[in-house]
Image (cartoon, helix red, strand yellow):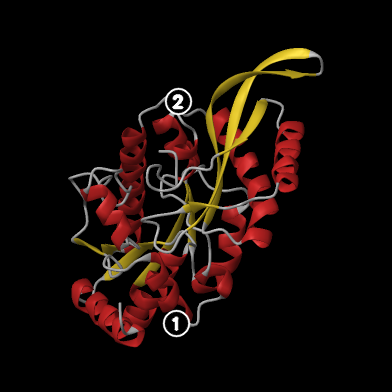
Amino acid sequence: MTDTEEFINDAIRLIQEKSGGEKVVIALSGGVDSSVCAELASRAIGERLIPIYVDTGLMRKGETARISEIFGPVGLKVVNAADEFLDALEGESDPEKKRKIVGERFIRVFEREAVKAGAKYLLQGTIYPDCVESDGGIKSHHNVGGLPLNIQFDGVIEPLKELYKEDVRNVAEALGLPGEIAHRMPFPGPGLSVRVVGRVTREAIEVVREANAIIEEVLVEKYRPWQCLGALVGLGTGIKDGKRLHGWIVSVRAVHSEDAMTAEPVEISFKDLKEIESRITSSIPSVSRVVYDITSKPPATIEYE
Protein backbone atom coordinates (compact mmCIF):
# COMPACT_ATOMS: atom_id res chain seq x y z
CA MET A 1 0.00 0.00 0.00
CA THR A 2 1.58 3.28 -1.11
CA ASP A 3 -1.01 5.91 -0.15
CA THR A 4 -2.92 5.50 3.11
CA GLU A 5 -5.44 8.28 2.48
CA GLU A 6 -6.17 6.95 -0.99
CA PHE A 7 -6.76 3.50 0.48
CA ILE A 8 -9.16 4.90 3.09
CA ASN A 9 -11.21 6.69 0.42
CA ASP A 10 -11.26 3.61 -1.80
CA ALA A 11 -12.28 1.33 1.09
CA ILE A 12 -15.13 3.64 2.08
CA ARG A 13 -16.42 3.60 -1.51
CA LEU A 14 -16.06 -0.19 -1.65
CA ILE A 15 -18.14 -0.66 1.50
CA GLN A 16 -20.79 1.76 0.25
CA GLU A 17 -21.03 0.04 -3.14
CA LYS A 18 -21.00 -3.55 -1.88
CA SER A 19 -23.51 -2.96 0.92
CA GLY A 20 -25.99 -1.43 -1.52
CA GLY A 21 -27.88 0.55 1.10
CA GLU A 22 -28.42 -2.50 3.34
CA LYS A 23 -27.44 -3.01 6.98
CA VAL A 24 -24.08 -4.70 7.64
CA VAL A 25 -22.93 -6.73 10.66
CA ILE A 26 -19.26 -6.70 11.57
CA ALA A 27 -17.35 -9.24 13.62
CA LEU A 28 -15.64 -6.72 15.92
CA SER A 29 -13.04 -8.56 18.00
CA GLY A 30 -11.17 -5.49 19.20
CA GLY A 31 -8.09 -6.36 17.18
CA VAL A 32 -6.63 -3.81 14.80
CA ASP A 33 -8.03 -5.48 11.65
CA SER A 34 -11.66 -5.58 12.72
CA SER A 35 -11.41 -2.18 14.45
CA VAL A 36 -10.13 -0.54 11.25
CA CYS A 37 -12.95 -2.21 9.32
CA ALA A 38 -15.48 -0.90 11.83
CA GLU A 39 -14.16 2.66 11.60
CA LEU A 40 -14.13 2.57 7.80
CA ALA A 41 -17.66 1.17 7.70
CA SER A 42 -18.89 3.69 10.25
CA ARG A 43 -17.68 6.48 7.97
CA ALA A 44 -19.10 4.72 4.92
CA ILE A 45 -22.58 3.68 6.08
CA GLY A 46 -23.09 5.20 9.52
CA GLU A 47 -25.93 3.63 11.52
CA ARG A 48 -26.37 0.84 8.99
CA LEU A 49 -23.33 -0.80 10.63
CA ILE A 50 -24.14 -3.29 13.42
CA PRO A 51 -20.95 -4.07 15.45
CA ILE A 52 -21.02 -7.42 17.25
CA TYR A 53 -18.47 -9.01 19.58
CA VAL A 54 -18.81 -12.75 20.11
CA ASP A 55 -17.46 -14.17 23.34
CA THR A 56 -16.45 -17.63 22.16
CA GLY A 57 -15.05 -18.79 25.48
CA LEU A 58 -11.69 -18.90 23.67
CA MET A 59 -10.61 -15.34 24.41
CA ARG A 60 -7.72 -13.99 26.47
CA LYS A 61 -8.19 -13.30 30.16
CA GLY A 62 -10.32 -10.18 30.71
CA GLU A 63 -10.81 -9.69 26.96
CA THR A 64 -14.59 -9.46 26.89
CA ALA A 65 -14.76 -6.90 29.69
CA ARG A 66 -12.07 -4.71 28.08
CA ILE A 67 -13.59 -4.80 24.59
CA SER A 68 -17.01 -3.98 26.04
CA GLU A 69 -15.48 -0.99 27.83
CA ILE A 70 -13.70 0.32 24.71
CA PHE A 71 -16.48 -0.17 22.17
CA GLY A 72 -19.59 0.04 24.33
CA PRO A 73 -20.08 3.74 23.51
CA VAL A 74 -20.45 2.92 19.77
CA GLY A 75 -23.28 0.47 20.35
CA LEU A 76 -21.30 -2.77 20.46
CA LYS A 77 -23.50 -5.81 21.03
CA VAL A 78 -21.85 -8.58 23.06
CA VAL A 79 -23.06 -12.11 22.34
CA ASN A 80 -22.10 -14.81 24.85
CA ALA A 81 -21.72 -17.98 22.80
CA ALA A 82 -19.02 -19.69 24.89
CA ASP A 83 -20.96 -22.90 25.48
CA GLU A 84 -21.83 -23.18 21.80
CA PHE A 85 -18.16 -22.97 20.72
CA LEU A 86 -16.71 -25.07 23.54
CA ASP A 87 -19.29 -27.81 23.08
CA ALA A 88 -18.53 -27.95 19.33
CA LEU A 89 -14.76 -28.12 19.96
CA GLU A 90 -14.80 -30.58 22.87
CA GLY A 91 -12.33 -33.40 22.22
CA GLU A 92 -11.24 -32.14 18.78
CA SER A 93 -7.52 -32.49 18.11
CA ASP A 94 -7.12 -31.75 14.39
CA PRO A 95 -6.01 -28.10 13.91
CA GLU A 96 -7.78 -27.66 10.56
CA LYS A 97 -11.01 -29.04 11.99
CA LYS A 98 -10.70 -26.65 14.94
CA ARG A 99 -10.49 -23.71 12.54
CA LYS A 100 -13.43 -24.93 10.49
CA ILE A 101 -15.54 -25.53 13.60
CA VAL A 102 -14.84 -22.00 14.80
CA GLY A 103 -15.49 -20.54 11.33
CA GLU A 104 -18.79 -22.42 11.09
CA ARG A 105 -19.94 -21.33 14.56
CA PHE A 106 -18.98 -17.69 13.89
CA ILE A 107 -21.06 -17.61 10.74
CA ARG A 108 -24.07 -19.21 12.42
CA VAL A 109 -23.94 -16.73 15.30
CA PHE A 110 -23.71 -13.80 12.92
CA GLU A 111 -26.50 -15.17 10.74
CA ARG A 112 -28.79 -15.22 13.79
CA GLU A 113 -27.77 -11.72 14.80
CA ALA A 114 -28.13 -10.45 11.22
CA VAL A 115 -31.72 -11.70 11.09
CA LYS A 116 -32.50 -9.88 14.33
CA ALA A 117 -30.93 -6.66 13.00
CA GLY A 118 -32.22 -6.97 9.43
CA ALA A 119 -28.65 -7.00 8.04
CA LYS A 120 -27.80 -8.51 4.66
CA TYR A 121 -23.98 -8.36 4.63
CA LEU A 122 -21.08 -9.50 6.81
CA LEU A 123 -17.97 -7.29 7.13
CA GLN A 124 -14.69 -9.00 8.09
CA GLY A 125 -11.12 -7.89 8.79
CA THR A 126 -9.43 -10.51 6.59
CA ILE A 127 -5.93 -9.39 5.55
CA TYR A 128 -3.52 -10.57 2.86
CA PRO A 129 -1.46 -13.09 4.94
CA ASP A 130 -4.73 -14.79 5.98
CA CYS A 131 -5.52 -15.39 2.31
CA VAL A 132 -1.97 -16.47 1.41
CA GLU A 133 -1.74 -19.04 4.19
CA SER A 134 -5.21 -20.41 3.46
CA ASP A 135 -4.62 -20.62 -0.31
CA GLY A 136 -1.16 -22.11 0.22
CA GLY A 137 -2.42 -24.88 2.48
CA ILE A 138 -0.37 -23.71 5.48
CA LYS A 139 -3.50 -23.26 7.59
CA SER A 140 -7.08 -22.22 7.01
CA HIS A 141 -7.77 -18.82 8.49
CA HIS A 142 -11.12 -19.22 10.22
CA ASN A 143 -12.78 -16.52 8.12
CA VAL A 144 -11.17 -17.63 4.83
CA GLY A 145 -10.73 -21.40 4.48
CA GLY A 146 -12.85 -21.96 7.58
CA LEU A 147 -16.03 -20.45 6.16
CA PRO A 148 -18.84 -22.92 5.45
CA LEU A 149 -20.05 -23.14 1.85
CA ASN A 150 -23.66 -22.28 2.67
CA ILE A 151 -23.76 -18.74 4.06
CA GLN A 152 -27.05 -16.93 4.63
CA PHE A 153 -25.69 -13.50 3.67
CA ASP A 154 -26.01 -11.62 0.41
CA GLY A 155 -22.25 -11.14 0.54
CA VAL A 156 -19.07 -10.88 2.63
CA ILE A 157 -17.21 -7.55 2.49
CA GLU A 158 -13.42 -7.65 3.09
CA PRO A 159 -11.88 -4.20 2.49
CA LEU A 160 -8.45 -5.10 3.97
CA LYS A 161 -7.74 -8.33 2.13
CA GLU A 162 -4.85 -6.86 0.09
CA LEU A 163 -3.06 -5.33 3.12
CA TYR A 164 -0.34 -6.61 5.42
CA LYS A 165 -0.61 -6.07 9.18
CA GLU A 166 1.71 -3.05 9.19
CA ASP A 167 -0.39 -1.46 6.44
CA VAL A 168 -3.47 -1.94 8.63
CA ARG A 169 -1.68 -0.33 11.58
CA ASN A 170 -0.84 2.67 9.39
CA VAL A 171 -4.48 2.97 8.39
CA ALA A 172 -5.52 2.73 12.06
CA GLU A 173 -3.24 5.64 12.94
CA ALA A 174 -4.51 7.68 9.98
CA LEU A 175 -8.08 7.03 11.14
CA GLY A 176 -7.19 8.26 14.64
CA LEU A 177 -7.80 4.96 16.46
CA PRO A 178 -6.25 4.68 19.95
CA GLY A 179 -2.69 3.34 20.16
CA GLU A 180 -3.93 0.46 22.30
CA ILE A 181 -5.91 -0.74 19.27
CA ALA A 182 -3.55 0.31 16.46
CA HIS A 183 -0.61 -1.59 17.99
CA ARG A 184 -2.47 -4.49 19.55
CA MET A 185 -0.81 -7.89 19.30
CA PRO A 186 -2.35 -10.31 16.79
CA PHE A 187 -4.62 -12.98 18.25
CA PRO A 188 -5.81 -15.99 16.23
CA GLY A 189 -9.44 -16.07 15.10
CA PRO A 190 -9.92 -19.57 16.56
CA GLY A 191 -8.60 -18.14 19.82
CA LEU A 192 -7.09 -20.35 22.46
CA SER A 193 -8.29 -23.52 20.75
CA VAL A 194 -5.17 -23.44 18.54
CA ARG A 195 -2.94 -22.86 21.55
CA VAL A 196 -3.93 -26.26 22.87
CA VAL A 197 -1.95 -28.71 20.74
CA GLY A 198 -4.14 -31.78 20.56
CA ARG A 199 -7.54 -32.33 22.17
CA VAL A 200 -9.51 -29.28 23.23
CA THR A 201 -11.12 -29.45 26.66
CA ARG A 202 -12.55 -26.74 28.87
CA GLU A 203 -9.86 -27.44 31.45
CA ALA A 204 -7.09 -27.05 28.86
CA ILE A 205 -8.57 -23.74 27.66
CA GLU A 206 -8.59 -22.37 31.22
CA VAL A 207 -4.98 -23.46 31.79
CA VAL A 208 -3.70 -21.87 28.56
CA ARG A 209 -5.70 -18.70 29.25
CA GLU A 210 -3.95 -18.24 32.60
CA ALA A 211 -0.54 -19.03 31.12
CA ASN A 212 -1.03 -16.51 28.29
CA ALA A 213 -1.99 -13.79 30.76
CA ILE A 214 1.23 -14.31 32.75
CA ILE A 215 3.41 -14.37 29.63
CA GLU A 216 1.90 -11.13 28.32
CA GLU A 217 2.30 -9.41 31.71
CA VAL A 218 6.02 -10.21 31.78
CA LEU A 219 6.91 -9.63 28.12
CA VAL A 220 4.67 -7.09 26.40
CA GLU A 221 5.81 -3.84 27.99
CA LYS A 222 9.48 -4.79 28.30
CA TYR A 223 10.12 -6.47 24.92
CA ARG A 224 7.34 -5.11 22.66
CA PRO A 225 7.05 -8.38 20.69
CA TRP A 226 5.05 -8.63 17.48
CA GLN A 227 3.35 -11.54 19.22
CA CYS A 228 3.84 -13.53 22.40
CA LEU A 229 1.89 -16.49 23.61
CA GLY A 230 1.83 -19.70 25.56
CA ALA A 231 0.69 -23.03 24.17
CA LEU A 232 -0.02 -26.38 25.78
CA VAL A 233 2.15 -28.78 23.80
CA GLY A 234 1.62 -32.02 25.69
CA LEU A 235 2.07 -33.66 29.07
CA GLY A 236 5.26 -34.31 31.01
CA THR A 237 6.27 -35.75 34.35
CA GLY A 238 6.96 -33.34 37.19
CA ILE A 239 7.03 -33.13 40.99
CA LYS A 240 4.80 -30.90 43.10
CA ASP A 241 4.38 -31.05 46.87
CA GLY A 242 6.61 -34.11 46.92
CA LYS A 243 4.29 -36.03 44.62
CA ARG A 244 4.59 -37.16 41.01
CA LEU A 245 2.61 -35.01 38.56
CA HIS A 246 1.84 -35.85 34.96
CA GLY A 247 1.09 -32.28 34.00
CA TRP A 248 0.91 -29.82 31.14
CA ILE A 249 3.97 -28.55 29.29
CA VAL A 250 3.62 -24.84 28.48
CA SER A 251 5.72 -23.60 25.57
CA VAL A 252 6.43 -19.86 25.56
CA ARG A 253 6.68 -18.17 22.16
CA ALA A 254 7.66 -14.56 21.48
CA VAL A 255 8.62 -13.18 18.07
CA HIS A 256 9.43 -10.00 16.21
CA SER A 257 8.05 -9.65 12.69
CA GLU A 258 7.23 -7.08 10.02
CA ASP A 259 4.39 -8.76 8.18
CA ALA A 260 3.78 -12.16 9.86
CA MET A 261 5.16 -13.93 6.78
CA THR A 262 8.52 -14.34 8.53
CA ALA A 263 9.45 -13.98 12.21
CA GLU A 264 12.44 -14.20 14.53
CA PRO A 265 12.42 -15.20 18.23
CA VAL A 266 12.78 -12.48 20.85
CA GLU A 267 15.97 -12.65 22.97
CA ILE A 268 14.46 -12.85 26.45
CA SER A 269 16.70 -12.65 29.51
CA PHE A 270 17.05 -15.80 31.60
CA LYS A 271 15.74 -13.84 34.61
CA ASP A 272 12.48 -13.03 32.79
CA LEU A 273 12.11 -16.58 31.52
CA LYS A 274 12.53 -17.84 35.10
CA GLU A 275 9.89 -15.36 36.28
CA ILE A 276 7.46 -16.72 33.68
CA GLU A 277 8.26 -20.32 34.67
CA SER A 278 7.95 -19.63 38.39
CA ARG A 279 4.65 -17.77 38.09
CA ILE A 280 3.08 -20.35 35.78
CA THR A 281 4.14 -23.45 37.72
CA SER A 282 3.27 -21.94 41.11
CA SER A 283 -0.15 -20.55 40.13
CA ILE A 284 -1.39 -23.28 37.78
CA PRO A 285 -1.34 -26.62 39.63
CA SER A 286 -1.68 -28.80 36.51
CA VAL A 287 1.46 -27.42 34.76
CA SER A 288 4.59 -29.53 35.24
CA ARG A 289 7.11 -27.60 33.14
CA VAL A 290 7.71 -24.50 30.99
CA VAL A 291 9.93 -24.30 27.89
CA TYR A 292 10.91 -21.49 25.49
CA ASP A 293 10.60 -21.92 21.72
CA ILE A 294 13.42 -20.24 19.75
CA THR A 295 12.35 -21.36 16.26
CA SER A 296 12.13 -18.80 13.44
CA LYS A 297 9.35 -18.59 10.87
CA PRO A 298 10.05 -20.46 8.63
CA PRO A 299 10.42 -23.32 9.40
CA ALA A 300 7.88 -22.87 12.20
CA THR A 301 4.67 -20.88 12.07
CA ILE A 302 4.06 -18.26 14.77
CA GLU A 303 1.11 -20.12 16.29
CA TYR A 304 1.48 -23.84 16.97
CA GLU A 305 -1.58 -24.85 14.96
Q: In the rendered structure, which amino acid carries the disc numbered 2?
A: Arg
The local secondary structure at tag 2 comes to loop
As rendered, which of 115 and 243 lies closer to the eye?
A: 243
Which residue position holds label 2? Answer: 199
Q: For the C terminus, which image quadrant?
A: top left
Position of 271 with respect to 184 (left or right) is: right
Closer to the chain start, of discs 1 and 2, is 1
- Residue 190 lies, in percent from the top left, at 41, 44
Q: Residues within 10 Å of mark 2 (few under 14, many from 20)?
A: some
The amino acid type, in three-letter code, at marker 1 is Leu
- The mark found on residue 264 in the picture is none
Indicate the position of residue 74 as horizontal and vertical percent values: 50, 73
Q: Disc 1 and disc 2: Cα gap in Å? A: 41 Å
Q: Residue at x 57, y 53 (%)?
A: 266
* 290 shown above or below 241: below
The residue that mark 1 highlights is 175
Q: Is residue 169 above or below residue 196?
A: below
How packed mark 1 is, by other alpha carbons closer than 10 Å (few <14, some 14-19, many 20 or more), is some
Nearest the viewer among 164 and 203 is: 164
Residue occupying the point 18% across, 61% down? 154
At numbered mark 1, what does the secondary structure look like: helix, strand or loop?
A: helix
**Residue that protrudes farthest toward the right in the picture:** 241
Image x and y of residue 144, in percent: 26, 51
Residue at point 22%, 57% (across, down) = 153
Residue contact at pointers 1 and 2, CB within 8 angstroms: no
- Looking at the image, which residue is at 48% across and 79% down? 173
149, above or below 97, in the image = below
Q: Position of residue 184 (x, y in %)?
A: 53, 64
Q: How many marks?
A: 2
The N terminus - image quarter: bottom left
Q: Nearer the viewer, residue 55 or 36?
A: 36
